[in-house]
Image (cartoon, helix red, strand yellow):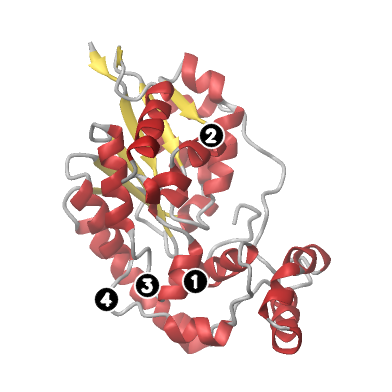
Amino acid sequence: MADHSVVLHLGAHKTATTYLQRLFFKNRQLLESDLGFGYVPMFRLRADVTTRLDRADSQPERSQMVEALRGYGVGLASDGRRVLLSDENLIGDCAEIMRSGKLYPRVLTRLRRLRELLGQEPREIWFAVRAYDHFLASAYVEANRHAKEFLSWDATAARVDLSRRRWPQVLADVRTVFPGARVRVWAFEQFVADDRSVIRHLIGEGAARLVYIEEAVRASSSADAMRVAELLSQTLGPAAAASVFAELDALLPKSATRLGFSPWSDDDKAAFRRLYEADLQQLGQAGGLELISVADQVAAPRPTAAI
C-alpha cells in the first residue's frame, strides 16, 4: 500500500490562488470521491500549519503541526490517493517581498521546515508566475491590505531589485528543497485566457465535471484608492492610512471607468516584460520543471476578476 501522495499548490500570490482554493473547496466532494484528491481547506491549512511554520523549532508546536498533517491523511497508508495542500503563504507573504525588495526571500527556510513536517517528498508542486509589473503592483496592494502602517509606494519601489532574484531563482529554491517532485508551472496570463485548460492539465479530464465559480473574486485596488491612501499617509500618518485602507478599497473600487493601480512608466513595463519573457523561456528549458501551455502566455492579460 502506498502513502498518501502530497500535491503542494504554493502560489504565487496574485495568480488567482484564492479563485482556485474556492473552486477546490466548492468541489471537494467530487475531488475526493471521483478524482482522487483529498482537498484540505486553505483556512484549515493556514491555521494549523502555515502561520506556525516560524515556530516549527518548538517541539510542542512541531508535534501539533505534524498531528494536523496526519489528520489530513498525509503519510497514512492508502491506495495512492492524493492530498492537495494549497496556500501561497507557505512560501512567504507579500509584505516580505515589499519590505525586502526581493521575490520570496525565505522560500528555502520555510519549505525546509515544511518538508520536515511532511515526512515525505510531495508528488507534485504547482506554481503560477506572473508578469513582474502586474505582480509587483498587486503584491504591493495586498501587502497594504494587511499592514498596520501604510507602505509608501516610492519607498517600496526603491527597494525592488529583480537583478538577482526572479521566478527562475524562486523555483530553483523550490527544486532544492523538493528535488524529486514533479514541478508544474504556468503563467497567470495563460490562466486568465483559458483557466479551464490549465486546470485540466493539473487534475486531468475530470476538470470538465467541476462546478465552476461564477461570482467575482476580489480584484486589485484602483489607482484612485491608492492615491488617496498615499495622501492620507503623508498627512495623517501611515497607521491612520492603514486603518481606513479597506474602506477606501470599497469606496473607490477598480472598475471599467476607474483604472487599476499601475505605478510603472511605459519604459518600466517594457523592461519588466522583457525580463518576464526571458524568464519564461528559461523556465521552459529548465530541468525538473514542466511549463504548462507556453504559447502566448505573455500576451497582455484580458480583464478578469480573479486577481
Q: Position of residue 67 (x, y in %)?
A: 39, 26
Residue ID at (42%, 22%): 71
Question: Type of residue at label 1?
Answer: Leu
Q: Which residue in the structure is indicated by mark 4?
A: 164
First in sequence, mark 2 or 1: give its number: 2
First in sequence, mark 3 or 2: give its number: 2
Residue 280 occupies quadrant: bottom left
Mark whose residue sits in front, 3 or 1: 3
Question: Type of residue at label 4?
Answer: Arg
First in sequence, mark 3 or 4: give its number: 3
Q: Quick one: which residue is furthest to the right in this view?
A: 251
How dense is the environment of label 2, judged by Cα within 10 Å: few (below 14), some, or many (20 and up)? Answer: few
Residue 258 occupies quadrant: bottom right
Mark whose residue sits in front, 4 or 2: 2
Q: Which residue in the structure is indicated by mark 2?
A: 44
Observer-nearest residue: 123 or 204? 123
Mark 3 touching mark 2, by CB under 8 A?
Answer: no
Q: CA distance from mark 4 to mark 2?
A: 35 Å
Observer-nearest residue: 117 or 20? 117
Please tell me the numbered disc located at residue 102.
Answer: 3
Residue 241 occupies quadrant: bottom right
**Left or right, residue 221 beside residue 164:** right
Mark 3 touching mark 4, by CB under 8 A?
Answer: yes
Q: Kindly state the secondary structure of the residue where label 3 is placed.
A: loop
Instruction: From this view, report whether residue 229 is shown above or below residue 193.
Output: below
How dense is the environment of label 4, judged by Cα within 10 Å: few (below 14), some, or many (20 and up)? Answer: few
Q: Position of residue 63 (x, y in %)?
A: 35, 32
Q: CA distance from mark 2 to mark 1?
A: 28 Å
Q: Which residue in the structure is indicated by mark 1?
A: 136
Question: Type of residue at label 3?
Answer: Lys
How dense is the environment of label 3, judged by Cα within 10 Å: few (below 14), some, or many (20 and up)? Answer: some
